[in-house]
Structures are given as C-alpha cells and as structure tokens.
Amino acid sequence: MFPNPQALSQAALDHYVHSNTDLDKHRQTGSMLMVEGDGVRVKDAQGRSYIEGVAALWCAGLGFNEPRLADAAARQMRRLSYYHNFAAKSADVPVALAERLAEMAPGDLNRVMFATSGSEANDTAVKLAWYYHNALGQPAKKKIIARRQAYHGVTVASGSMTQLAAINGGFDLPIDRFIHTDCPHYWRFAEPGESEADYATRLADSLERLILAEGPETIAAMIAEPMMGVGGVLFPPETYFPKIQSVLHKYDILLIADEVICGFGRLGTMFGSTYFGVTPDIMTLGKQITSAAFPLSAILMTDRVFDVIAAESGRRGTFGHGYTYAGHPVGAAVAMEVLDIYQERDILSHVRRMGRVLHDRLAALADHPLVGEVRGDGLVAAVQLVDDKAARCFFDPAQGVAKGVAAHLQENGVILRVLSNDSIAIAPPLIIGEHDLTLLLDRLESSLNWAA
Ligand code: PLP
C-alpha cells in the first residue's frame, strides 16, 4: 500500500511542490523524505535518524509515533468517522473538547469554534472581530494591527498579519485593513541605556500613536503571539503586555492572542497568555492541541464577544461562518487523548525541568564568539548568531552562516531551524528527555565550533 520512498526521489523532483522552499534549487537538490517516527526522532528514506529539535514545526509535542493517538483516531474512525457542525448539528466529541478547552483557558474564554489550521483559526478570529464591531454598530472598525516580524499564517488575512519578507514576498500582502506596529525585541531594538520597562512604555506609546494616526474608530483588533516564534523566539519585557492591553482597552480594540505555538505547554505554562498575564478577547490554538497528529485548530472567545455575535446572528438568522472539517470528530478524539496524556505525564512540570537543562546549557554558550544572544524559556529557545559580538552586527544573509550551522547539525543527526536568516530555533517535542536534550545541545555546540 505504501510506495517505496527511495523510489520516490524522482517523483518528488517531477511532481511535488514544497512549502517554504527555493523551488528552483529543489530541482537540483531534491527532497528529504521522512518515513518513520520514533519518539523525538524521525528517520529518512536513507535510514538516517534525526532528533527533531523543533518538533517538526513546533508542533509534535508527543513526538512522532505515540501509539495512544493512533488508537484514539482508529476508535473514533470506527465509531463516527465524520460529521459536520452546521445548522446546530455536530458530532459529540468536539463538544466535549470545547468544554475542556473552556475549562483550561484563562479568564472567560468560554466559547469555542474549530478549524483545521492556525492560519484558518487566525482568519476566523479576524472575521469574528469584524462581525463583532458590525454588530455593535461600529462598521468603520475594520483595521487589524499586527507586529513587524510576526507570523500568523499564510492565508490572505493571516498572511496579511504575518510580516516577514521571506514569507510575504511576491504575494502582494498585506492587503488593505492590515497594519503593523513594533516588534518587541529588547536586545535588538532598545535604545542604548534604555531599561526594559522604558522600552515597553515606548512601544505602548508608539502603538497609541499609530492608533491615533489611523483613527481609533477604524481599528477592530490587535493580534499578538505571547512569545513570537517564527519571528525569532522573542519574549517581550514583563510590562509590555499590560501596557499594550491598557492602550487597547482605551480605544475599544479587541486583543487576539495567537497561541498556535505557545499553547499547550511550550513555555512551561499551559498557554502563553498565562505566562505573560494576558487576558485576550479571542485566543487561537493549533499545533500541539493534537500533537500535530491530526490537523485541528481552535478559536476561543470570551462570553462578552460571543453574546454580541450571538445576538447579531439572531438578527440575521444565522452565523454564516464555518468549515467542512471544523470540529472533525477524529481530530477532537485525538486532541482529547493528547490532553489526557499531557495531564497524566504532568507535561508542564516536565517542560520546566527540561527547560532548566536547556537554558543552563545555553547560558554557557552566550560567550561563544558567534553568539550574540540566547533567549527563551520552557522548551523553546533561540541562539542569535552575530558577525561582530561587541557591535551586535549581523551576518550578511548571503553568507548563510546560520544555514551552514543547521546543515552541519543535520549531517550530525539533529534537525534545528533557522529563523530570519540569523538565529537558530530549538523547540523539541515536549516529551524530550535529558539524555536526548543533552545530545542535541552537544551537537549544537560542536556545529557552532565548526562554524567559528
Ligand atoms: N500562528 C503562529 C504563531 C504560527 O507559528 C503558525 C505556524 O507556524 C501559524 C499561526 C499558522 O499555522 P498553520 O501553519 O497551521 O496555518
């Protein structure tokens, strides 16, 4: 039933279009085909095994072959393999999952919708914000503020909130209605001598100036990842979110927390919002909700937002939004099993314990001549490479230094990811143990030494 992956190399060259890949170069280099998972490891068609140091796309929290997820999916497929959630009908499991997410989520994020990807979840959040303000008789409130270097996905609305040249180049994004404010990276963007608190105040002031320049009556929502992942593993100063939230409150602007990476333990707390004390109006979840074993995402909204939306749908006769696969029962069954496993294994304590191993070791790497900054918490980190440590001067992207380090690591059995040309992300499956984590870090250090 399965094709022979080794024989598929030519098919990959002739037929397969990758994402986030230089497609022209791919004609020469071909594809790396993964054929098996074993805990935190994946094996390619040549039989080489790798520690997946970024949990693939920050998502395979339980690794790559958790048997309980296979059993949960199979059980649900035999019971009820599909039902939609239109017209007040639904499979039963997604309802149980909604109740569980509402109990887990901070504040009164009590109403839950489902989708299949982070991009769709963020698109849905934007539509909710528009619908909400229309319902309140504020139809001019349409603009969405995101942050520079943000990654919120690639569909037209999510892609318009993403602001990374490598992702948006050639696609004419952002479209109208999407604007961007500062990226909160203290190490990189603070003025000399500026404290973290002053830097956070400056960013909040800059946000307020943007809102006033655009007209507060035109702004619907701001979207923010609590910790910016793809943009570089950026943790804002402690006072950043409280200050940003007070500006948003002042102008009646909703806050959407994009928890697609942070959600379900990555920072050692269940959600990034909990970590930073953020109280969003809308929260989007994906990736680790099913440990990536099934495509599922969720959109949570507060009772206040829901009540406005429900009343408006009453006036219109329906709430005209939904996806064929929203609330897929197999995805919901997998998510329920994942949440059971996170709970049984006390995954948050494990992440905090392994996080200490990771960050103690990275702190020692901060003196390395190629390393400008190490940052992160829990099981997520970035090693920022610099050409000139004292001047905080970055390598010319054409030199491909970070890519060279990642390629060297891959030859040595560890997959890590380069972000924004110059930093290396570490975000292993949440279940990684000390032995594999130490192995990963040993190899990272060797590759940095090799590149120095
Ligand atoms: N939001 C964040 C913070 C992400 O990191 C990603 C993907 O990496 C997305 C949204 C988009 O999710 P998806 O690729 O499932 O559409």
Image (tube, helix red, strand yellow):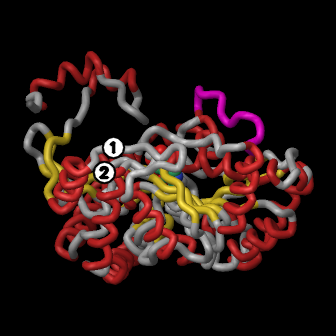
Q: Is residue 409 left or right of residue 253?
A: left
> Residue tagged by mark 2?
330
| Residue assigned mark 1 | 82
Mark linked to residue 257: none
| The residue positioned farthest toward the top in the image shown | 14
Q: Please tell me how crowded label 1 is: few (under 14), some (14-19), or many (20+) other residues with Cα within 10 Å.
A: some
Relative to residue 64, is residue 374 drawn left or right?
A: right
Instruction: Give the quadrant of residue 306.
Output: bottom right
Residue type, numbered disc 1: Tyr
Dot 1: what SS? loop
Element type at mark 2: helix
Helix, strand or loop: magenta stretch: loop
Q: CB of mark 2 within 8 Å of CB of mark 1?
A: yes
Closer mark to the observer between disc 2 and disc 1 = 1
Q: Nearer the viewer, residue 114 or 121?
A: 114
Q: Is residue 174 magenta?
A: yes
Q: Which residues are magenta?
A: 169-180
User: How far across and down, in percent of the image, does residue 131 sit?
Assistant: 73, 48
Is 71 contained in the magenta span?
no
The residue under the point 58% across, 63% down is 111
Q: Residues within 10 Å of mark 2 (few under 14, many from 20)?
A: many
Label 2 or label 1, whichever comes before in sequence order: 1
Residue found at x 87% / y 51%:
138
Amino acid type, mark 2: Val
Residue 396, visible in the rendered structure: no
Residue at (54% x, 60% y) in the render: 112
Would residue 86 be visible to someone looking at this image? yes
Horizontal side, residue 92 vs residue 112: left or right: left
| Residue at image location 14% in from the left, 57% down from the top | 38
